Image (cartoon, grey):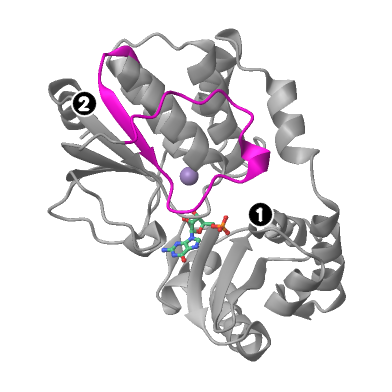
């Protein structure tokens, strides 16, 4: 399927690249790198983010954005679930490039490979297949995406191939130290305030650890949406946690759930039970109601899957 995508990229002139709401390192890095590649082929590219890029992820080079372009092709990058487009409607013919395991995309033009660490790894493959030079700007963005989705080269998706690509990207000018520090060592005070509240009320039952943060608490400490990103990873670093569940209120009646599991498929299975998806060990979903009203039910569902091994 990669070759089909390469043909589409070669044979069209006007693209829009859309990624998921709440763009993370992979969404930002993969979209910017692909845009640079297409621009180097003389194409017009519009970059679309359903919600703004967090200010902490604005440090990599940004390509020119042809905002007024009417796209022939809408490339959905790193989007596992159409509900993660924030209600945005692609304007061109849809082409999906993704590394998530979820959703039936039969009949759609797509290249989906859940063995890839990240959408950024897939963009690297596309650029190499099209013999596009990996410039420093491209390398920095791809490295950011791979670093983000492998959790800084620690998750199970950190394959030998990932290290080979990271090596190539570092050789092409990506700065591993700068990127690691920008992603890992620039947490806000609000992040730690959230962490304190989350740890304080953590429910721990048979390897399933669950906690939450309310909208009121987020408002009280004037948290920005991105201030809670990374909290679930922190919970997962606790000894004994097999499955961690973190609920965050998005608005007065909507809660987002992020999960991580250390082994097995409990994160994905629990997410699917609530209509969500993701990967075996990192998954999520959105549900109605308040966090404090839902946490027990999600933990109970998690316990079913953890005990299945
Ligand atoms: P995170 O916890 O970092 O937000 O998400 C972890 C993984 O779960 C990501 O791969 C993401 O695609 C998936 N995920 C998070 N939220 C949702 C959601 O609401 N729906 C679906 N289908 N997947 C989600
Ligand atoms: Mn990704």
Q: Is residue 178 magenta?
A: no
Q: Which residue is mark 1?
A: 226
Q: Mark 2 or mark 1: which comes first in sequence?
A: 2
Q: Quadrant of the C terminus?
A: bottom right
* Distance from Cα at disc 2 to Cα at disc 1: 32 Å
Nearest the viewer among 248 and 117 is 248
Residue 249, relative to residue 117: is it above or below?
Answer: below
Q: Is residue 223 left or right of residue 126?
A: right
The residue sitting at 25% across, 50% down in the picture is 90
For label 1, being within 8 Å of ligand 1 is answered no
Nearest the viewer among 108 and 209 is 108
Q: Which residue is mark 2?
A: 9
Nearest the viewer among 65 and 284 is 65
Residue 135, relative to residue 149: is it above or below?
Answer: above
Q: Position of residue 224 (x, y in %)?
A: 69, 58
Q: Position of residue 15 (x, y in %)?
A: 25, 33
Q: Position of residue 204 (x, y in %)?
A: 77, 78
In magenta, the rendered stretch is 40-67
Q: Is residue 47 magenta?
A: yes
Residue 127, relative to residue 148: is it above or below?
Answer: above
């Amino acid at each position: 399927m990669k070759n089909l995508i390469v043909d589409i990229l070669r044979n069209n002139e006007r693209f829009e690249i859309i990624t998921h709401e709440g763009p993370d390192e992979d969404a930002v890095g993969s979209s910017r790198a692909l845009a640079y590649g297409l621009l180097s082929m003389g194409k017009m590219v519009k970059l679309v983010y359903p919600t703004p890029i967090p200010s902490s992820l604005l440090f990599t080079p940004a390509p020119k954005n042809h905002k007024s372009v009417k796209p022939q092709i809408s490339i959905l990058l790193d989007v596992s679930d159409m509900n993660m487009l924030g209600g945005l409607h692609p304007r061109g013919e849809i082409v999906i490039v993704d590394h998530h395991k979820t959703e039936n995309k039969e009949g759609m033009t797509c290249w989906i490979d859940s063995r890839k660490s990240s959408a950024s790894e897939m963009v690297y493959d596309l650029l190499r297949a099209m013999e596009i030079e990996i410039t420093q700007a491209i390398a920095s963005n791809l490295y950011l995406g791979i670093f983000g989705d492998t959790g800084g080269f620690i998750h199970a998706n950190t394959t030998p191939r990932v290290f080979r690509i990271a090596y190539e990207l570092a050789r092409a000018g990506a700065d591993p130290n700068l990127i690691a520090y920008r992603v890992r060592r620039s947490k806000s005070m609000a992040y730690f305030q959230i962490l304190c509240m989350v740890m304080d009320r953590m429910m721990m039952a048979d390897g399933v650890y669950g906690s939450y943060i309310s909208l009121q608490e987020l408002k009280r400490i004037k948290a920005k949406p991105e201030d809670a990103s990374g909290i679930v990873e922190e919970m997962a670093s606790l000894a004994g946690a097999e499955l961690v569940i973190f609920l965050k209120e998005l608005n007065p009646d909507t809660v987002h759930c992020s999960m991580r599991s250390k082994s097995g498929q409990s994160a994905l299975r629990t997410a699917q039970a609530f209509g969500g998806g993701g990967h075996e060990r990192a998954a999520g979903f959105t549900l109605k109601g308040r966090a404090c009203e839902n946490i027990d039910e999600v933990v109970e569902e998690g316990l079913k899957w953890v005990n299945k091994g």
